[in-house]
Amino acid sequence: MPPEIVYLAAAVMIIALVVMVIVITGRMRRIESALSEYSEKSLKAVREEFRTNREDSGRQVKLQMDEMRNSMKMLGDMIGDRLTDISKQQRSKLEIFTEQISKLTETNEKNLKNLQIKYLPN
């Protein structure tokens, strides 16, 4: 085989190899670009999901705090009402007790006067 043909075949092979490298490099760049775009979209989606979760958590916390505040207010109102009822009952019982003590004192005074009249001469 003549050397020109060998050189020509070698040159064609080198050109084919260069073309293959260029084609593969182009495909690699497109793949890299597609991966980069996918990565950016994924990162954006994850950030959006985190933001949504934070907002949802904030709303849930606010709702729970409002519910707790309302429950505590209701509890305070119930305790206040109960204390008012107990105070009224105690006042009523104290009035009855005071009345009974007054009657007892009056009765004791009458009995003491009767005893004095009966047993102590003037």
Image (cartoon, helix red, strand yellow):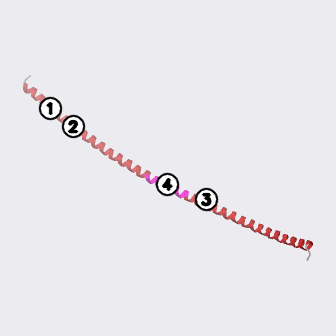
Dot 1 corresponds to which residue?
14
**Percent x, y of residue 79:** 64, 60
Q: Is residue 28 left or right of residue 79?
A: left
SS assignment at label 4: helix
Q: Nearer the viewer, residue 110 or 8?
A: 110
Mark 3 or mark 2: whose residue is earlier in sequence? 2
Residue drawn 82% across and 68% down?
104
Badge 1 amino acid: Ile
Instruction: Report the residue marked by disc 2.
Output: 23
Q: Element at badge 3? A: helix
Q: Closer to the camera: disc 1 or disc 3?
A: 3
Q: In the rendered image, which residue does mark 4 sit on? A: 61
Q: Residue at x 15, y 30 (%)?
A: 13
Residue pointed to by mark 3: 75
Q: Is residue 109 left or right of residue 8?
A: right
Q: CA distance from mark 4 to mark 3?
A: 21 Å
Quadrant where the image shows the C terminus: bottom right
